[in-house]
Image (cartoon, rainbow, N blue to C red):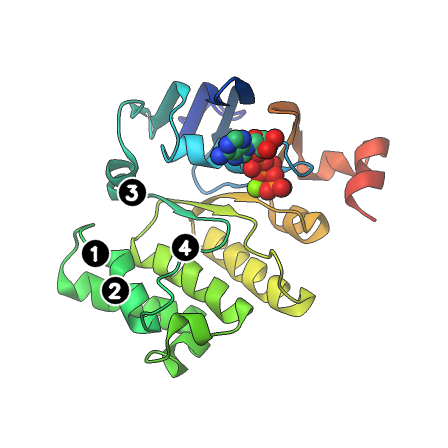
């Protein structure tokens, strides 16, 4: 249940993951309500990427996952993607030798939808990121960091996500470009897309998010409404500098 008593878009219960003997993620529970923008903050090594990979089944984990009230614990990454759980990974995971267009088409690959649907998604991605249209035939590896991140988000959108999960999309980008990408995420959320974002650029990410989880040493230390952070003296000093 969400705070408002609704069925969450995604609800994760007691999710835990190890690397060998190291418990990188201790039993962790969180949810994203329909149409909500949730940010996860936390220092390097806190387990943020591990948490996202556990949710999307890129690594083995224990615990339960429900999506729109349905138990999806046993599903694999690809089946979760078909339901609309799509992740933009840290480092973007693009096919560097392929063109922008080819990378986008891979986002839609095997996830179904008529060709008219796919065309509509291209149009939407190009509307959000006009630079991708201009560079449709360019090799992905030759794009700037910001353009590559736009492409990674664009490719995720081609899969028609219901929940978009992003791992530090602003990493290594100039502040202006990072702001542009994050504000696009804000617009997608306003149009109804659920978003779960791991981000180090806290002030920017907190402007967009309705709720925040703070992860540290592999577990959730705090769950707050964004507006509560400012009245939390220690957190405010840490995250709004
Ligand atoms: N493949 C792996 N094998 C062993 N240990 C790992 C592996 N991946 C991550 N870890 C360890 O698990 C812990 C959590 O790592 P994780 O990448 O989830 O942190 P993070 O919060 O995403 O950090 P960052 O902000 O630096 O991206 C760290 O101590 C890390 O060293
Ligand atoms: Mg990480």
Q: Which mark is residue 81?
A: 3
Q: Residue at 33% of width from left, 30% of height from top?
A: 68
Provide the secondary structure element on which disc 1 rests.
Answer: loop
Q: Residue, x 62% and y 24% (percent of image)?
A: 220
Which residue is denoted by mark 4 in the rendering?
Answer: 93
Q: Kindly report the distance in space between the C-alpha atoms of the residues bearing marks 1 and 2.
A: 6 Å
* Contact? badges 1 and 2 (CB < 8 Å): yes
Residue 223 picture quarter: top right
Q: Is residue 240 visible?
A: yes
Which element is circle 3 on? helix
Residue 29 position in % (x across, y down):
51, 21
Q: Earlier in the sequence, mark 1 or mark 3?
A: 3
Relative to the observer, which residue lies in front, 81 or 53? 53
Q: Are the residues tagged 4 and 2 within 8 Å (C-beta)?
A: no
* Mark before the other along the chain sequence, 3 or 4: 3
Label 1 – label 4 distance at C-alpha:
15 Å
Residue of label 2: 105
């Amino acid at each position: 249940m969400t705070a408002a008593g609704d069925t969450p878009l995604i609800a994760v219960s007691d999710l835990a993951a190890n690397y060998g003997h190291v418990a990188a993620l201790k039993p962790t529970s969180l949810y994203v309500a329909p149409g909500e923008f949730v940010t996860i903050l936390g220092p390097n090594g806190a387990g943020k990427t591990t948490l996202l990979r556990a949710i999307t089944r890129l690594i083995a984990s224990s615990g339960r996952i429900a999506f729109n009230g349905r138990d999806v614990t046993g599903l694999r990454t690809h089946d979760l993607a078909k339901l609309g759980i799509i992740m933009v990974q840290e480092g973007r995971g693009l096919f560097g030798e392929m063109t922008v267009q080819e990378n986008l088409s891979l986002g839609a690959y095997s996830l179904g939808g008529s060709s008219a649907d796919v065309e509509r998604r291209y149009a939407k991605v190009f509307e959000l990121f006009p630079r991708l249209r201009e560079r449709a035939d360019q090799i992905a590896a030759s794009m700037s960091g910001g353009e590559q991140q736009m492409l990674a988000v664009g490719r995720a959108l081609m899969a028609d996500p219901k929940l978009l999960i992003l791992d530090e999309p602003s990493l290594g980008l100039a502040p202006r470009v990072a702001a542009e990408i994050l504000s696009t995420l804000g617009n997608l959320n306003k149009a109804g897309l659920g978003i779960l974002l791991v981000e180090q650029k806290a002030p920017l990410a907190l402007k967009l998010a309705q709720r925040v989880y703070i992860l540290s040493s592999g577990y959730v230390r705090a769950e707050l409404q964004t507006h509560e952070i400012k009245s939390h003296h220690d957190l405010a000093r840490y995250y709004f500098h």
